[in-house]
Amino acid sequence: MGAMSNKGSIGNMGTMSGMPPQVTSGSPMTPAGTVISTAAPVYEQSYVENIFRLNLGKVGTFYFTYENNKDWNAKVYTGVLEAAGRDHLIISDKATGQRVVLLMVNFDYATFDEPLVYQYPGVIGNPGGVRGCR
């Protein structure tokens, strides 16, 4: 009878799935086999619009290229950086007050004659604080 009860419990184990639980690679498990789900770390990426947003109010020179344009293939704008979005930036001319909306799809690069505020993304805490770059 003892053999039967062992056989019975082995039989019961046989009805359980013999496959280990499916988990994503690298997921930690407890000794009991429970998967511990952890949120993936989220790191902010360094996008140019974020750098522009940190430097609103500064005067810059912005270089743009307009492909397939016979009249002006490249254009340079100088002005006060007023706003920056994912797909555009707005600069203004101090002398005239005129504002220009520029599309980032045509953006090449920008220069500034003063230090820029830049915080490296993905760093926990604030090591060294916000730095001025030259």
Image (cartoon, rainbow, N blue to C red):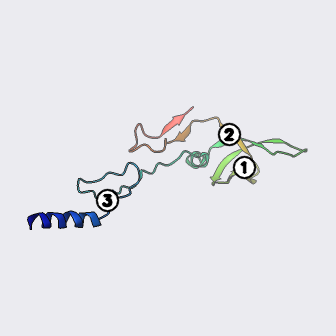
| Structural crowding at the residue carrying mark 3, measured as other residues with C-alpha within 10 Å and reported as few (<14), some (14–19) or many (≥20) | few
Q: Earlier in the sequence, mark 1 or mark 3?
A: 3
Q: Nearer the viewer, mark 1 or mark 3?
A: 3
- Residue at 68% x, 39% y is 110
Q: Residues within 10 Å of mark 1 (few under 14, many from 20)?
A: few
**Alpha carbons under labels 2 and 3: distance apart:** 61 Å
Measured as percent of width and height from the top left, residue 105 is found at 72, 49
In this rendering, position of residue 103 left or right of residue 67:
left
Residue on which disc 3 sits: 18
Task: Determine which residue is flagged by label 2.
Answer: 110
| Rendered image: mark on residue 105 | 1
In the orientation shown, which residue stands out farthest toward the top? Answer: 134
- Residue at point 87% right, 46% down? 69
Q: What type is the residue that disc 2 sits on?
A: Ala
Mark 2: give few (<14), some (14-19) or many (20+) Cα within 10 Å.
Answer: some
The local secondary structure at tag 1 comes to helix
First of labels 2, 3 by sequence position: 3
Residue 67 percent coordinates (x, y): 82, 45
Quarter of the image for the N terminus: give it. Answer: bottom left
Q: Residue furthest left?
A: 2
Q: Could you tell me if residue 92 is visible in this image? A: no
